[in-house]
Image: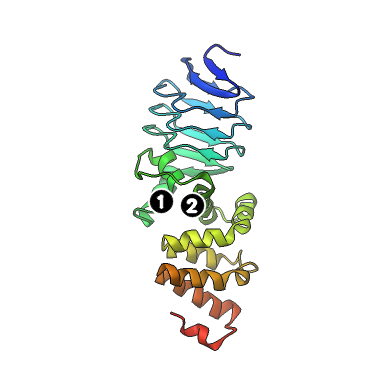
Amino acid sequence: MPEEFEIRDAVLIKYNGKSAAVTIPDGVRKIERRAFRGCKQLLSVTIPEGVTTIGDLAFEECTGLTAVTLPHSVTRLGSYPFYACAGLTSVTIRDIRFDAAALREQQEKWDYYPWEVINILIMSLPVFSFCLPFAEQKYPVAWTAFCLCPTDMENTAYVRMHLEDMLRFLIRHNDARTLQTALESGMLDDLLPNCIDTCISYAIEQQSLETQLLLTNYKHEHIGYTDAADQFTL
């Protein structure tokens, strides 16, 4: 095992080297909290498949990093793993590349919208005092990818598999713009009849008028009303 890596029980505890390009050894399952903290000379890091967890502040102050690719095996991100990585301009998540310009446009659309993963990885700012669990972090990431790259089959499969949960996420945050993009894409038309009524009810419960109106209009135009009173449920 290379001496620059301090590894115990498949956990990378600390990186002690000075290399500009680092490949994390195969067999590592977790990158521990602050494992690469302050490695300003680090220009690139290769995270292999098999890593499932990236801990809190794992790459804090790695100011030389400009791009990062997360492997498919990652199932948990800690709080602000790339905090103060001022040079970071692109992140690839599930083979979809998000560059700074695209993500800045996304962020401008949703003031305080909790895009935890995007803000953490790209903006490198602790803009929220809480951190969503990874299962819910994947919803905003997947929706962003859906908007930027709707033909990506893996992303589309994830969106379709978790469609009702995704819709509820958008309703909770009253994100009418992203919901409209999804509805207009036509790629979810076969699934929406199965969950549209429960989502409309949820929008009413959440007092999310914009998303409620979008869903109600979609039902009227694409599915039709099963009850004449439905059209007055606003």
**Res 211 visible:** no
* Cβ atoms under marks 1 and 2 closer than 8 Å: yes
Task: Estimate how packed mark 1 is, as few (under 14), some (14 to 19) or many (20 or more) residues with alpha carbons within 10 Å.
Answer: some
- 154 displayed left or right of 85: right
Q: CA distance from mark 1 to mark 2?
A: 8 Å
Q: Residue at x 57, y 62 (%)?
A: 164
In screen coordinates, is 113 left or right of 189?
A: left
* Disc ID at residue 212: none
The extreme top residue here reads 3
Three-letter amino acid code at the position of disc 2: Pro
Residue under numbered circle 1: 114
| Sequence-first disc among 1 and 2 | 1
Q: Residue at x 44, y 39 (%)?
A: 121
Helix, strand or loop status at disc 1 = loop
At x 49%, y 64%, the residue is 179
Q: Position of residue 40 (x, y in %)?
A: 39, 22
Which x, y percent locates residue 98?
49, 44
Residue 140: which numbered mark, if any?
2
Question: Where residue 151 sits in the image (x, y, percent)?
Answer: 61, 55
Name the amino acid type tagged 1: Pro
The local secondary structure at tag 2 comes to: helix
The residue lying furthest to the bottom in this view is 228
Image quarter in which the C terminus is found: bottom left
Asked if residue 222 can be seen in this view, the reply is: yes
